[in-house]
Image (tube, grey):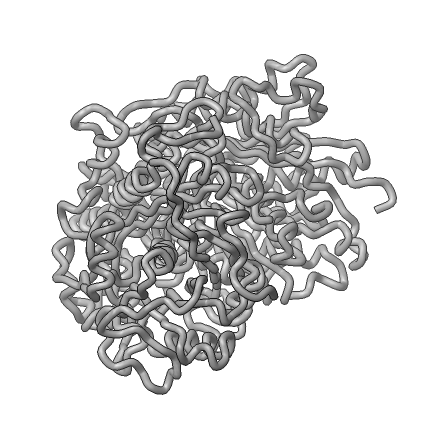
Amino acid sequence: MRAGVRTAERDGVWVTGIGLVSPIGAGRAAFWASALAGRRGFAPVARFDPRPYGLDSAYAVPAGAAGARRGATQREWVGGREGAPEGPRAVALLLAAGRQALADAGLTRRPRGPAATRCAVVAATGIGASQAHEAMARSWHAAGQATGHASNGSPTPAGARLGGTLPGDLAPLLALAAGFAGPALTLPVACAAGGFAIAAGFDLVRAGRAEAVLAGGVDELSEVAMCGFARLASLDPAGCRPFDRDRRGIGVGEGAAVLVLERATTAAARGARPVAAILGYGLSADAHHITAPDPSGAGIVHAMRRALDDAGVAAAAVGCVSAHGTGTPAGDRVEAEALAACFGAHAAALPITSIKGAIGHTGGAAAAFGVAVAALALAGGWVPPCAGTRVPDPSLGVNVVVDRPQAVTGRAALVNAFAFGGSNISLVLGACRRSDGGDPGAGGGWPWA
Amino acid sequence: MGLDGTGDGTIVITGLAALTAAGVGIAAARDALRAGRPLWAAPAPVALEPRAANVAARVAACGCDPAAILGQTGLRGLDRVTRLMLACARLVLDSAGEEPPAPAGLAVVAATASAGLGGLYDFFLDALAQGLRFADPGRFPNVMINTAASHVAIRSGARAACLTLAADGTAGPDACAYGAGLLAGGRADAVLVVAAEEVTAPLVLAAWPGRRGAAPPLMDGAAALLLERARDAARAGRRPLAVVAGYGSASPAGRRMAGRRMGGRTCLDAARRAAGAALTPRGDAPVAPGDAPAAGGREAPSLVYVPWPARARPRFAGDGDWRHAASTPARLWARRRPAPAIVAVNEVFGDGLAATSLLAVCLAADHCARRGPGARALVHACGRLGQSSALLCAGPAAGK
């Protein structure tokens, strides 16, 4: 393994735009201000009654946030007639984040011709458009109750539409909306999906298959998820408290996080300002249990070490960790022990944070939010605190950021994401020197056209 | 190098498996394709276990019980997609000989459009019936789309990686290319690529919304293959069946949202670019719109597997985009002179979304294995929203 951080400016894949629709704010600036302030988006649920699950709040994107209104984004961004069918909420959130990301990158015009064919999309989700399916299930249940036979119920009650609700539709719909005509892949790898999407986007750019990639994830507030995690006794009624002494579990959330990834050389040529660079990633599978993490943490350690090796980054050069940190007693312990195994004595001083305390567990978007946090921390120099965490669990032996931001201590950041069933991914980001050349917003981009 | 399957040595296919209405194994599927007789049954209500919804479809269902392959142990609570994936994965690993790939270097790449969907309804309808406080937690993991792949990883001990692609008709080439990328990038030593679909009422309504009866004949079943680096296969004594020789993927460069629809031209453009990229040496060069596949001296395949024949389009009701997309690869290749042999896989097995897409790759690899060096077969797939992917299989070099 090489010492230090490889020159991100020369051969890295840049993050040039970030779009975030979250319970603590929409847009990079609003999100980051809230994150640094330790604000939480844990609020009473309006969409359904959560009391059967032993709590009254969750992490929902507030009404009025960009893209939160179903169908709004589709019409505002790509046009269309009034009164057209509204898309699923997951699609609306994803498109809103995608639009933000492109604007943040200064890519305001749709690419045309050959430029469009060099642009790809990789989307991620955990469950997908859950709300539409929950509504359909409720209507079938109600019809069955009314007649005594579910089979007599109408499968298509008024207003219940399932078009666009297959998880695999997410990437093609984002590609169509953005005018990207390259590959469009959807990776539903549960809670780690957003990390897999960004890694796949990184590969597409690094392999020369794409010049720009919209990569990220989305999940909408799901009653099914809340019901399931409640029955698994994995919900914390007080909201998510990552690495806290009294943590009890996750907080169900929703949101979308999308990043624009570009080849460093072409992005620099158009005068783009990098937020950070993606340097590498590592994968592993626990092959242990469908819901419980492998207590040995071997798979997690392997993914982290593989990521550092892939990135050419020494453990000592890592200046912060954007942890998976779901707030479950077992999950946080395994991750902390794996961090200690990977970083040794460096782990005790390494600032570790998890954004899930602020925005909850956003499922397929969670890892993309984690990458965004790492990129913004490297760009700004500060690691946001774990919102909701009051007293870090002293038995974990790691430096959990609480109450106020801590300074980033190195030029690289590690992002962890682990999924149901033991799919693990770790990504390494590097800090970039800010470019002083050009205004990427002036020309609308696409220099390789 | 991630999705680039050509960066680090030759990637070969060393195992094939299929569970279709034709029976167990790729030979049964090959014979059924040769016979050319559709395997789907008359329209019948689509089950949503344990309930039934008022949705009918023509389904070519795999009659094999996965438990007959796997045994009963450990299957309780698993949905049909997971059982199909597990059974097909078992078959393909068993075909790898006495020395199967080591679990530490084995990765699982699953592809499906239906995984999680049936599980979501199963879990939530049960919760609504029993009371939300009393939902069965054992059924909850089936809600997650990646759970089926995770079960495959747990059963096979795969520890290199485990992930799922949610795609419909393009899933076969996409998943193979992803797996080839894991091998080329040194992230795995062998990749188990598996796809499965279960026909449920929500899947029919979500995949073919709009008018009742818009869905084409459907497939319930699975397909799987094993990918390895050629040098690793040779070391383990496994015979390469086919070489993964090229891959391309493209999306339509049109607008289709909020009531707008793409036309056949935008689908055709995406299909042309995907095939062009798959046939380009190294498979990663940009191909401009209008660049016809196999033009400019590129060597064309003699055999192309497509989902539906060109004449199928008028037969399908429903969503206009899907009607255009479904027959686009066949229309594209029918224009070429001399036209290659075109095989419409879905015309026999039904539209199995990810499953028939990967089945087409298996059939192409089987063709190359039987024909040997010089054989070239292209799988040209399309998705419901106009996206297109293509994978070129070639016969293995003599003596390997």
Residue A359 lies, with reference to residue A175, above or below; the image says below
Quick check: A48 left or right of A314?
left
In front here: B185 or B42?
B185
- Point 68% across, 22% down: residue: B341
- Point 15% across, 52% down: residue: A62
- Point 33% across, 68% down: residue: A407
* Direction right: furthest residue: B399
Q: Is residue A136 visible?
A: yes
Residue B227 lies, with reference to residue B151, above or below; the image says above
Residue B258: quarter of image? top left
- Point 55% across, 35% down: residue: B349
Q: How many marks?
A: 0
Q: Position of residue B112 (x, y in %)?
A: 48, 47
Q: Is residue B12 visible?
A: no
Q: Position of residue B239 (x, y in %)?
A: 79, 50
In front here: B197 or B256?
B256
* Direction front: furthest residue: A436
Residue B351 lies, with reference to residue A144, above or below; the image says above
Residue B4: quarter of image? top right
* Direction bottom: furthest residue: A395
Q: Position of residue B317 (x, y in %)?
A: 38, 23
Quick check: A221 left or right of B90?
left
Quick check: B34 left or right of A44?
right
In front here: A390 or B66?
A390
Q: Position of residue B137 (x, y in %)?
A: 33, 68
